[in-house]
Amino acid sequence: MENEILKIGAKQIPYFRTDEFSQLMFEIEKLFVKILNAPMNSKFILLTASGTGAMEAAVMNLFTEKDKVLVINGGTFGKRFAELCRLHGIDFRTIDLKFGERLTEEHLKPHDNKGYTALLVNIHETSTGQLYDKKLLSEFCKKNDMLFVVDAISSFLADEYDIEKYNIDCTILSSQKALALPPGLSFLILSEKSVERIKNRKPKNMYFNLSDYLSNMERGQTPFTPAVGIVYQLYEKLKNINNVGVRPFIEKTKKLAHHFRENIDNLNVVVPDYSLSNALTPILVENAFEVFLKLKKKGIFVTPSGGSLKNRLLRIGHIGNLTTEDNETLIRNLEEIL
Ligand SMILES: *Cc1c(COP(=O)(O)O)cnc(C)c1O
């Protein structure tokens, strides 16, 4: 996190049912719409919940037992979408990818004209680092008249993202990835089609009733107390991004990712050959979890993996307030450990 954002986090939390706070929320909505290139009639929802909360809210409010959805299951987060559909009684099919398997048109073909309502995808499957092809998926949705639901939590601000260009009906974001804010907020940016669906649904749930969030947002408010402090940090962050420009902001992460990838030849590690997000570099290392622990002892944090990848895969982050010097320190320490 950046110092100026940390400082805001140390301030008193003001009362929020005020016109001033509503204006702040409207400004945030405008900034998101601009940064994501969303059509002007898009709607914005702010949830006080981790990213999974927003994924669950989307699933519960967009679909019913009458729908049938397709889920790209290429890792932990794809599996989570499938699990949410199962929990909420929504008929679903999955495209299962094995570790290392690249998503291609061939995977989609068998699902053409099968009467699906929507496609659910984590555009960057953070557990493996695979960045899926937005154009391919967008065209598949258009051709099959499906709602395009994208969890862009770990891709937003790391890779190009354009709601209008890719016809994205529901974008799911959260505060703690490239926005580099504390965890606790998540966001939905909805197309007109999604809004219509939400207005006609009555989920048996109070906290995640999105129709309630939409009507509250008309006056710049949320139904329940939001994480007010993080909202102030978010506003500052979005203003900064907007001042720099989204593209240069993404370029910075891209540069950092390339710098890391170009300087690990000596490490004797393998980087999978599917297309990668700029957000992180997955590296296949022997005794991965032990390497994670050794780095942690030195105050350096990389991300370990779960399940069968626990001792094989580490993920090196490039988002937030990191620098090429941080990369160099990490590489030096990895050289020592490996
Ligand atoms: C981080 C992340 C989430 C959110 O996880 P939470 O722990 O609930 O915040 C969801 N999807 C993807 C792709 C992520 O990377």
Image (tube, rainbow, N blue to C red):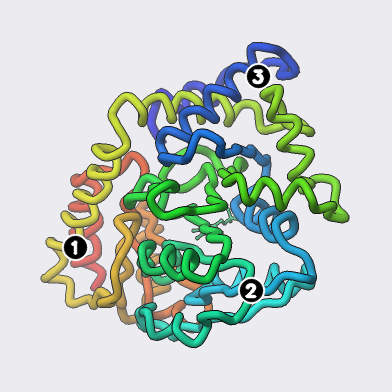
Which residue lies at the image location 24% right of the left edge and 73% below the top edge?
338
Comparing 68 with 300, the one in front is 68
In this picture, residue 40 sits left or right of residue 155? right
Under circle 3, the secondary element is helix
Comparing 327 with 211, the one in front is 211
**Residue 22: quarter of image:** top right
Comparing 38 with 172, the one in front is 38
In percent of width and height, residue 188 lies at 59, 45
The alpha-carbon separation of the residues under discs 1 and 3 comes to 44 Å
Query: Quick one: which residue is furthest to the right in this view?
Result: 204
N-term-proximal mark, 1 vs 3: 3
Residue 147 versus residue 76 in the image, above or below: above
Is residue 129 in sight in this rendering?
no
Mark 1: amino acid? Arg
N-term-proximal mark, 3 vs 2: 3
Comparing 325 with 271, the one in front is 271
Under circle 2, the secondary element is helix
| Disc 3 target residue | 22
| Disc 2 target residue | 82
N-term-proximal mark, 1 vs 2: 2
In percent of width and height, residue 211 lies at 76, 42
In this picture, residue 316 sits left or right of residue 54? left
| Disc 1 target residue | 261
Under circle 1, the secondary element is helix
In percent of width and height, residue 101 lies at 37, 83
Mark 2: amino acid? Ala
In this picture, residue 260 sits left or right of residue 294? left
Mark 3: amino acid? Ser
Task: Check whether the beta carbons of the residues at disc 3 and disc 2 lie within 8 A of each other.
Answer: no
Would the CB of label 2 be found within 8 Å of ligand 1?
A: no
**Labels 1, 3: front one:** 3
Residue 54 versus residue 39 in the image, above or below: below
